[in-house]
Amino acid sequence: MKYFSRISVLSLCLLLTVFAQSFGQGYEIEARIKGIKDSSLILMHYSRSNTQFVPRDTAKADSEGKVVFNGKKELPGGLYIILFPGNKNWVELVYSGEERKIVLNTDTTDVIGNMKVSDSKENELFYTYQQELKKRAKEMEEVRKAGGADAQQKLMASQNDFKAFRDKLLKDNTKSFTTKLLRMSSDPEIPAAPKLANGKSDSVWVFNYYKAHYWDDYDFADPRILNTPFLEPRLDRYFKNLVVQVSDSLIKDADKLIAKTIPGSDIRSFVVFHITNQYENPKTVGTEAVWVHMAEKYYLSGQMGTSEDVKKRIAEKVTTLKPLLVNKTFPALTLTDQTGKKVSPQTMPAEYTVLFFYAPTCGHCKEASPKVKSFYEKNKDKGIKVMAISIEHDVKEWKSFIETYHLDGLVNAYDPLKQIDFNRKFDVVTTPTVYILDKNKKIIARKMPVEQLEDFMNYYQNKVGKKI
């Protein structure tokens, strides 16, 4: 995947400061790869995850598998790969930005096992680690296959030996970029947990310790961490697994994490963008407030250097979403029913009101309507009402839709005067769109898939102690 990164002025200044001695020297990366010949190879680095890469150079291997990548400008630091023909195999290498020349020798039958490194302390360290890891993994696999009464003991001994090796390697090379990479790729080590009164380990303490130390080995002032496969999956795991999925908690943790980054840096830009993007159309009901917060605090404030045109579009969406967030009272909406009578969700007496925005010409709406009707019939005696709202204006099509899909019994309504912009006023970007309101017409769910209505209502009623 070709990817182009915008380097901010501050990030450029940081790079110039950190790598001042290296700039202007260029780079030379030589690899001799037995099994590759007369083929073009690509030098690229990871970009935020293990699925995105930024190509930086191409070169052709000769008949003996020798390939040389070189250039007059310094490469950005990061974890790189030399991609083989066919795009399925590669050689990884560490480029810290401080080593001008790197020489690698290996072959395609066992890239890690046969790797020999010259002129690069970083890659000697990297492949010493990889080779020991591979050796231990092979040993443990053999123990598992052999079995025996002492198999578990042997496995534990091998794990402990590798941990001791790793700890020493990291301790002896604290200033190495490779050490930074290895620490970033690992979870925080958790000390022995205190015991509860029942003698069991305190699992809450373990969780809190793990979360508190989750980012300890991430240097958010180092722009090189963007050019690794670790940051994006780390962010995803943190917000999906370690933060309570309610807006207040998500916002608090997002701001706390962003505060670790340098204003104006590419790392801050990416972290802000990634979090914001996850909550524009969130998978968890009611967390759109995170997107609104991020938009206002980081984009509309000017922190992100967003263009005026983009800021205008963001501001328009914020204006639409803010009154429609979970826990807000649903805005006033007056429509007309089949008899010409004015109707409104605000005047419908109901324990819960489901608003089903649809278009009579919409295929998905035709599939969803019978499910909405079934839900209503099952729950109408429990104080639940449904208002089916057509966002289109052809009366004949509207009434035909009601008859075809047997929506009688629901409150059917539309806007005969074409005065309502359902998109801007009620965020009906696609149809069907479903809102659920409580007795006081407060929004308790939005953008709810029709298939999940029953499950959500049972969950919500359990939550408030009134299971339907």
Image: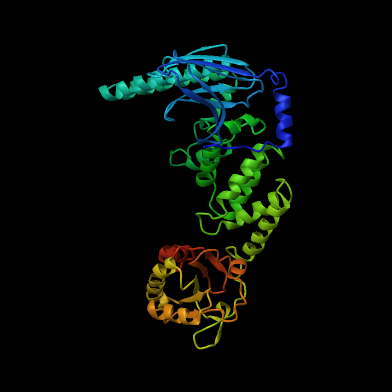
x and y percent of residue 463 in the render? 48, 62
Q: Relative to 146, is 169 on the left or the right?
A: right
Q: Where does the image place residue 30, in percent across and percent down from the top left?
A: 54, 15
Q: Is residue 177 above or below residue 9?
A: above
Q: Residue at image x 65%, y 60%? A: 318
- The one nearer the camera, 227 or 288, is 227
Q: Quadrant of residue 292?
A: bottom right
Q: Closest to the observer: 395 or 152?
A: 395
Q: Position of residue 328 (x, y in %)?
A: 61, 66
Horizontally, residue 41 falls left or right of residue 322, namely left
Can residue 331 be seen by looking at this rendering?
yes
Q: Is residue 415 left or right of residue 377?
A: right
- Is there any visible trace of residue 115 in the rendered image? no
| Above or below: residue 27 compared with residue 225 | above
Q: How is the image coloured?
A: rainbow
Point 64% across, 60% down: residue = 317
**Residue at 67%, 57% in the rendered image:** 313
**Of the pair 35 and 298, the residue shown nearer to us:** 35
